[in-house]
Image: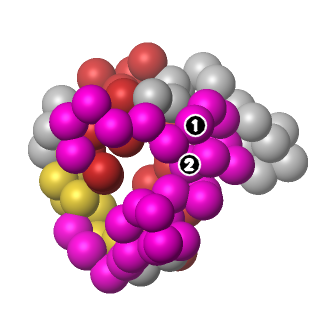
Amino acid sequence: MNKPAGALLGPGRYYGWGWDAFTDCLCGGFAVAPPFTLTWHASEVARRALADVVEDPQDGLSSFEEIVRLLERRGVTVVLR
């Protein structure tokens, strides 16, 4: 998950790899602190690419849905374009 770093922290920035690094990025400090609005351009491309990836079979959500859900739980307004 290096690509979202540019969207959340600025071009060329890196905050680590994986789910834990992504969630850490939303806690402020060295990264961004919600609340803010994230406009996700070409979100349908990401939705299709991550549609078959299910991290937790119990909840049945795709990785795309998990990402959006996490962002919203952390106080980010997500606008899908």
Q: Quadrant of residue 68?
A: bottom left
Count all numbered tags in the image, as a single digit: 2
Residue 48, picture quadrant: top left
Point out the residue furthest to the front here. 30
Residue 66, compared with residue 73, is above or below; it is above
Which region of the structure is painted magenta?
10-37
Which numbered disc covers residue 22? 2
Amino acid identity at mark 1: Gly
Residue 35 image position (x, y, % from top left): 32, 81
Closer to the chain start, of discs 1 and 2, is 1
Residue 17 in magenta stretch: yes
Q: Is residue 79 above or below residue 66?
A: below
Q: Residue at x 51, y 30 (%)?
A: 1
Whole-angstrom CA distance, mark 1 to mark 2, is 7 Å
Residue depicted at x 43% and y 18% = 49
Pointer 2: residues within 10 angstroms few (<14), some, or many (20+)?
some
Image location (x, y in percent) of residue 2 = 45, 29
- Which quadrant would residue 56 be assigned to in this image? top right
Residue 67 drawn above or below residue 79: above
The reply to whether the C-beta atoms of the residues labelled 1 and 2 are less than 8 Å apart is yes
Residue designated by label 1: 16
Residue 69 at least partly seen: no
Magenta region includes residue 27 = yes
- At label 2, which amino acid type do we have? Phe
SS at circle 2: helix
- Name the dominant secondary structure of the magenta segment: loop
Left or right relative to 53: residue 60: right
Horizontal side of 46 relative to 66 (left or right) equals left
Depth-wise, is mark 1 or mark 2 nearer the camera?
A: 1
